[in-house]
Image: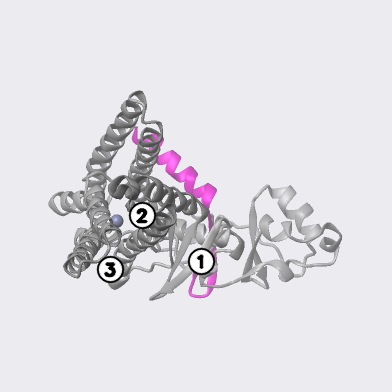
């Protein structure tokens, strides 16, 4: 359904605890981990309930008993949710084919969130990824329709035919809803890609698509309010919730592009700190806290042995160590050793720096050139840079 792109790369670098909190892992396809959020189970139960005690009994009356309706409702719901997974996977598999890395898709209350390693680089790529989902839904609708037709032909029980009719219909609805040209819906992404293609500006294309998206979101909320007024409380609340969610994503999508644009043309060397205070690896954590964290007030330090950077340490690494152990444990015991993940080149862009920081989660990176540390870049420094730029450009 709706996609939110989060700038997160390799899933294995995200701590296990945050990765699975409130989520259930389903399966893995082409390296993409499909996970469901617990909120999805609520919707699952709601859909089963509304099909088994509303939709099917309404269509077939007393022809079947309650148990049969619940079985039909369960089967239809499972296939409906499988259809949503296929819709999401079509986006993701297309993105993977375009060379983007997608470690995980999470299905939550309003659809799916695919974690892309980065945004599509060009409008054609975005267009391909955005159209893949609705296309898959239309194909599924056609398949269910053919099955329904076949069942009618062999004179199968009406309820079974009804299940496939519902599935065919719901997949058309899914595709059509997602084709509304407001960001973050697929249609909004398609609109963004087309405007981007025509104007060459991702920022103005995103503004267009997110404005339409916000308009659509407001329309849903107003419709929801009207429904509540007319006595349809659940349906109305539902529309209001979807509208609120879409509005928030539409707004944040635009801001993200603007931030990326102001960061995009700037290189790490322009923002990095040159004179870095470094901590020695043999220092005990106790001393580190007193002589470094409390003295300098920084959130982290590079670890340097005889002029050579060997790692990075921040409060996060010390937090997990019990107080009595801090007198004996040293910096080298708990630091993040020097690796690809905590270093960046001086000529890399700030967008890459920000992305890397969000993966490691310690808000700083060592700036390394030809194996030597030439500085450090911090999230605080980066935000200060953005703020200065914003003030001066107003
Ligand atoms: Zn979609």
Q: Is residue 319 visible?
A: yes
Q: Would you say the beta carbon of the disc 1 residue lies within 8 angstroms of ligand 1?
A: no
Q: Callout 2: 10 Å neighbours few (<14), some, many (20+)?
A: few
Q: Is residue 230 left or right of residue 321?
A: left
Q: How is the model colour-coded? A: one colour
Q: Which mark is residue 94?
A: 3
- Nearest to the eye among marks 1 and 2: give it: 2
Quadrant of the rendering where the C terminus is positioned: top left
Q: Callout 1: 10 Å neighbours few (<14), some, many (20+)?
A: some
Secondary structure under badge 1?
strand
Spatial separation of the CA atoms under disc 1 and disc 2: 36 Å
Residue on which the image places disc 2: 64
Query: Considering only vertical position in the picture, is 216 above or below 93?
Result: above
Q: Is residue 173 left or right of residue 225?
A: left
312 and 195: which is toward the camera: 195
381 is within the stretch colored magenta: yes
Q: Which mark is residue 359?
A: none
Ligand 1: quadrant of the figure: bottom left
State the residue at coordinates (27%, 32%): 219
Q: Position of residue 58 (x, y in %)?
A: 31, 45
Q: Residue furthest left?
A: 198
Query: Considering only vertical position in the picture, is 391 above or below 20?
Result: above
Residue on which the image places disc 1: 25
Asked whether the residues under the numbered discs 1 and 3 touch, taking CB atoms below 8 Å apart as contact, a structural biologist would say no
Spatial separation of the CA atoms under disc 1 and disc 3: 22 Å
Q: Position of residue 358 (x, y in %)?
A: 50, 57
Q: Earlier in the sequence, mark 1 or mark 2?
A: 1
Secondary structure under badge 3?
helix
Q: Is residue 143 left or right of residue 110?
A: left
């Amino acid at each position: 359904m709706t996609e939110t792109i989060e700038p997160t790369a390799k899933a294995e670098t995200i701590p296990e605890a945050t990765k699975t909190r409130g989520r259930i892992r389903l399966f893995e396809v082409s390296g993409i981990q499909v996970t469901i959020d617990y909120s999805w189970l609520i919707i699952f139960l709601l859909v089963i309930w509304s099909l088994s005690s509303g939709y099917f009994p309404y269509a077939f009356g007393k022809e079947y008993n309650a148990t049969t309706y619940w079985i039909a409702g369960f089967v239809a719901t499972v296939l409906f949710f499988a259809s949503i997974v296929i819709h999401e996977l079509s986006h993701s598999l297309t993105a993977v084919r375009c060379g983007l890395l997608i470690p995980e898709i999470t299905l939550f209350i309003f659809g799916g969130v695919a974690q892309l390693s980065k945004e599509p680089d060009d409008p054609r790529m975005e267009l391909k990824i955005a159209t893949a989902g609705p296309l898959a839904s239309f194909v599924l609708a056609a398949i269910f329709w053919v099955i329904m037709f076949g069942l009618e032909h062999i004179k199968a029980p009406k309820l079974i035919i009804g299940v496939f009719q519902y599935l065919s219909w719901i997949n058309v609805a899914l595709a059509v809803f997602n084709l509304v040209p407001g960001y973050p819906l697929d249609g909004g992404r398609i609109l963004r890609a087309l405007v981007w293609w025509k104007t060459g500006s991702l920022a103005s294309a995103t503004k267009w698509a997110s404005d339409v998206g916000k308009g659509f979101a407001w329309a849903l909320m107003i419709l929801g309010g009207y429904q509540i007024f007319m006595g349809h409380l659940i349906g109305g609340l539902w529309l209001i919730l979807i509208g609120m969610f879409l509005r928030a994503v539409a707004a944040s999508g635009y801001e993200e592009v603007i931030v990326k644009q102001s960061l995009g043309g700037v290189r790490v060397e322009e923002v990095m700190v040159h004179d870095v205070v470094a901590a020695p690896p043999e220092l005990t954590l106790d001393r580190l806290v007193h002589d470094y964290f409390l003295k300098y007030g920084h959130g982290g330090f590079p670890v340097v042995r005889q002029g050579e950077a060997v790692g990075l340490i921040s409060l996060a690494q010390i937090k997990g160590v019990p107080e009595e152990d801090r007198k004996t444990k040293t910096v080298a015991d708990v630091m993040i050793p020097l690796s690809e993940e905590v270093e960046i080149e001086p000529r890399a862009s700030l967008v890459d720096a920000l992305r890397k920081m969000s993966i490691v989660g310690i808000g700083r990176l060592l700036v390394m050139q030809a194996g030597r540390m030439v500085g450090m870049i911090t999230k605080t420094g980066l935000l200060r840079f953005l703020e200065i730029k914003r003030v001066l450009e107003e």
